[in-house]
Image: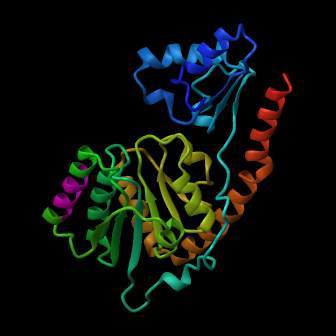
Amino acid sequence: MNDFYNLTGYVARWLSLGQLRVLTHVRFLPQVLPQVFARPWRWLAEHAAHQVLCVSEAVRKYFDPSNACVRTLYDPLPAHGEALPPYMVSANVNNAKQTVRMLYLSNYIRGKGQNFALEAFRLAYARNPGLQLHFVGGDMGMAKNQDFRQVLEATAKAAGLTEVVHFDGFAANTEAAMKAHDILLNFSEAESFSLTCLDALYYGVPLIATDCGGPAELFENGRSGLLVPNRDVESMAIAINKLAADVALRRQFSAASRIFVRQKFAPAHTYLLLADCYSRALAGR
């Protein structure tokens, strides 16, 4: 079952008189859900599933630490590898204009942090006029997401940032989008894992992310990326200015992040473990 609010597997197990084996994946942060629902779902997962597979330690912490059937199983690295040449920090630095291009790659959904990024950029830009910010993402055809994007665009216009802040729609080639920029930002309020952050680290694009759950487990703060407090705009702006001004630090992050994620999220630690979980379930173990 994908996420523990899906109760059909438990019903099916009951109808099978306990013979059906149930594996429950938890891919979001239960801590941010209404607890009147989350707590019963947690109890069912811990008592009715044979295994509960959490996408990060941030998710795992929500469950009973003594329950051996609950384990962390990270998402894997991009299966297709890198289709484009390796990312090079030096190739993205314009020495004449000192322009540093930042990318915010996320659908326009409240809670994904674009509003914090825009405010942090406004503060950082006042200290460094060489900055640019590019928002890329879809609205999923939903009116509330379209409204959110319009609010962001209106805010950028009111702040006089239309020349340096740009908004675009969905990008099919995220590797190309990331590698065309100098820094990737992710200031989400809650993330169980964040494939966007993982991809940026995998491609070697310097990352600044919020301490909002899973992203803190994807890199080493200060060595392969920068982690800032959740919803702390001033800290975000400081981190932007720090990384934008330090080409050597960006090169360090680029090299270190590529090594770190390839080791931590190697097949033996991700999808091969998943295969083992299902093999054991099929074998009745």
Q: Does residue 151 show up magenta in the picture?
A: yes
Q: Position of residue 9 (x, y in %)?
A: 61, 20
Q: How is the image coloured?
A: rainbow
**What percent of the width, then of the height, locates residue 152?**
23, 56
Most foreground residue, 186 or 278? 278
Looking at the image, which residue sits at the far left? 158
Compared with 46, 30 (above or below) is: below
Extreme residue toward the bottom, this view:
96
Q: Main secondary structure of the magenta part?
A: helix
Q: Nearer the viewer, residue 202 or 234?
A: 202
Quadrant position of the N terminus in the picture: top right
In this view, 124 is above or below 211: below
Q: Nearer the viewer, residue 89 or 25?
A: 25
Q: Is residue 253 left or right of residue 109?
A: right
Residue located farthest toward the front when viewing the structure as drawn: 15
Q: Looking at the image, which residue is at 13% across and 62% down?
A: 158
Q: Measuring 35% from the left and 68% from the top, which residue is drawn there?
A: 134
Near-viewer residue (237 or 284): 284
Tell me if 127 is positioned left or right of 70 in this view: left
Is residue 88 found inside the magenta-colored segment of the image? no
Instruction: Identify which residue is drawn at 59% across, 74% down.
Output: 251
Magenta part of the chain:
148-156
Residue 103 in the image: x percent, y percent? 41, 66
Q: How many marks?
A: 0
Quarter of the image with the C terminus in it:
top right
**Residue under the point 25% across and 55% down:** 149
Q: Position of residue 205 (x, y in %)?
A: 55, 68
